[in-house]
Image (tube, rainbow, N blue to C red):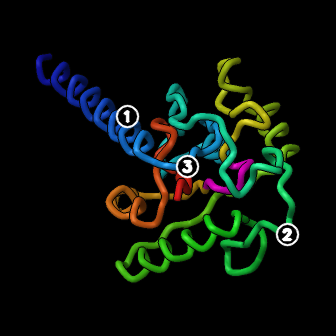
């Protein structure tokens, strides 16, 4: 029994360290990132790293403002000309230009280190956010999706990735060098470009 208590306490300490680290990282940035919440993309698949997706109870670590490159746009309603494919030109997954360039550099570095991962989601239009919220429910309703118009995906700065333990470890050690960070503590697959 004492071993179980120690394991639970150890898990809580790790969670507190991750949240504190994200807060420290974000507190030191000079440009604000948009609001983002657990958005349920991995729940749509039902699995994360072969395990059932966990219930989202983490709060976003961003302050709700648009990134400087999107101040004249609305979340989920970005000009398509400002979006760049990050999937070999297929156009299935898009990010704004700065985030896309940084992501390509990140992916090239990962590949050079023998790390490969898949993209599951990137930019989401407002209508896609509405459909996701209808299917999964919003966080304030007990669901797992961000409120439409509040998802980091709607700014074209976030990607959801399929990451095993090794890939997640690599991302946590290296993604910051490319301007990406975890902004939703309960979603280790969700990475946001903060520059």
Identify the secondary structure beneath mark 3: loop
User: Quadrant of the image for the N terminus?
Assistant: top left
Q: Earlier in the sequence, mark 3 or mark 2?
A: 3
Identify the secondary structure beneath mark 2: helix
Residue 6 in sight from this viewpoint? yes
Q: Position of residue 83 (x, y in %)?
A: 77, 66
Q: Is residue 22 above or below residue 179?
A: above
- Residue at x 78%, y 72% (from the top left corner): 91
Q: Earlier in the sequence, mark 2 or mark 1?
A: 1
**The label number, if any, that marks residue 81 in the structure image:** 2
Instruction: Choose between 172 and 31: the one closer to the eye.
Output: 31
- Residue at x 54%, y 39% (from the top left corner): 53
- Residue at x 53%, y 54% (from the top left corner): 194
Instruction: Choose between 115 and 123: the one closer to the eye.
Output: 123
Q: Nearer the viewer, mark 2 or mark 1?
A: 2
Q: Nearer the viewer, mark 1 or mark 3?
A: 3
Q: Is residue 144 above or below residue 176?
A: above
Residue behind mark 1: 19
Residue behind mark 3: 31
* 3D distance between C-alphas at marks 3 and 2: 23 Å
**Dots 1 and 3: beta carbons under 8 Å?**
no
Q: Position of residue 155 (x, y in %)?
A: 72, 51
Q: Is residue 62 above or below residue 189?
A: above
Identify the secondary structure beneath mark 1: helix
Please give left or right for residue 193 compared with residue 86 in the image: left
Q: Look at the image and give the residue range highlighted in magenta.
A: 153-158
Please give left or right for residue 17 compared with residue 85 in the image: left
Q: Residues within 10 Å of mark 1 (few under 14, many from 20)?
A: many
**Dots 2 and 1: beta carbons under 8 Å?**
no
In terms of image quadrants, where is residue 43? top right
């Amino acid at each position: 029994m004492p071993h179980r208590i120690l394991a639970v306490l150890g898990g809580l300490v790790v969670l507190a360290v991750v949240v504190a680290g994200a807060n420290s990282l974000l507190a030191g940035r000079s440009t604000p990132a948009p609001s983002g919440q657990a958005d349920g993309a991995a729940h749509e698949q039902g699995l994360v790293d072969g395990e059932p997706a966990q219930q989202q109870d983490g709060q976003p670590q961003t302050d709700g403002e648009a990134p400087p490159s999107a101040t004249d746009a609305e979340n989920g309603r970005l000009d398509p000309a400002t979006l760049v494919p990050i999937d070999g030109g297929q156009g299935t997954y898009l990010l704004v230009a700065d985030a896309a360039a940084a992501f390509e550099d990140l992916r090239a570095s990962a590949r050079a280190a023998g790390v490969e991962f898949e993209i599951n989601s990137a930019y989401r239009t407002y209508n896609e956010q509405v459909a996701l919220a209808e299917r999964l429910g919003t966080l304030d309703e007990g669901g797992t999706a961000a409120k439409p118009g509040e998802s980091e995906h709607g700014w074209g700065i976030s990607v959801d990735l399929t990451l095993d333990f090794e890939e997640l470890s690599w991302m946590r050690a290296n993604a910051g060098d490319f301007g990406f960070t975890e902004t939703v503590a309960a979603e280790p697959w969700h990475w946001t470009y903060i520059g």
